[in-house]
Image (cartoon, rainbow, N blue to C red):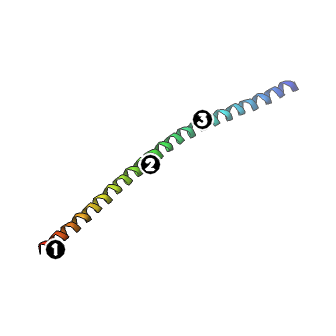
Amino acid sequence: MPTLAALTVREAQLTRTSEGVAALETRASELTALAEEKTAAIRTAERAVTTARAQISALRKLLDDSETLIAASEGSDAAVQ
């Protein structure tokens, strides 16, 4: 009889271990999906930053060009007067 009791205890331990492994596998899958989601969000943010930098650069160039045109315009106005 003690052997049967020991087997029953061992079976319960194996069941708990199996359930623990299943829970860990589920959690690992959830974390993998979350990591993929966050990686995609980071890539989206990086693209947004790149776009914003390009827009800032274009606006700076436009501002520089405008300042050059204004300076040239003021110079030609002074020559006319």
Whichever of labels 1 and 3 marks the residue nearer the N terminus, that label is: 3
Q: Residue furthest right?
A: 2
Q: Would you say the residues marked 2 and 1 are in contact, meaning their CB atoms lie under 8 Å apart?
A: no
Quadrant of the frame with the N terminus:
top right
Q: Relative to the observer, which residue lies in front, 45 or 17? A: 45
Residue found at x 38% / y 54%: 53
Q: Nearer the viewer, mark 1 or mark 3?
A: 1
Q: Where's residue 25, x and y in %? A: 62, 34
Q: Relative to the observer, which residue lies in front, 24 or 13? A: 24
Which residue corresponds to mark 2?
46
Say left or right for 48 vs 9.
Answer: left
Which residue corresponds to mark 1?
78
Residue found at x 50% / y 43%: 39
Element on which disc 3 rests: helix
Which residue corresponds to mark 3?
26
Residue 22, compared with residue 4, is above or below; it is: below
Whichever of labels 2 and 3 marks the residue nearer the N terminus, that label is: 3
Residue found at x 53% / y 38%: 33
Element on which disc 1 rests: helix
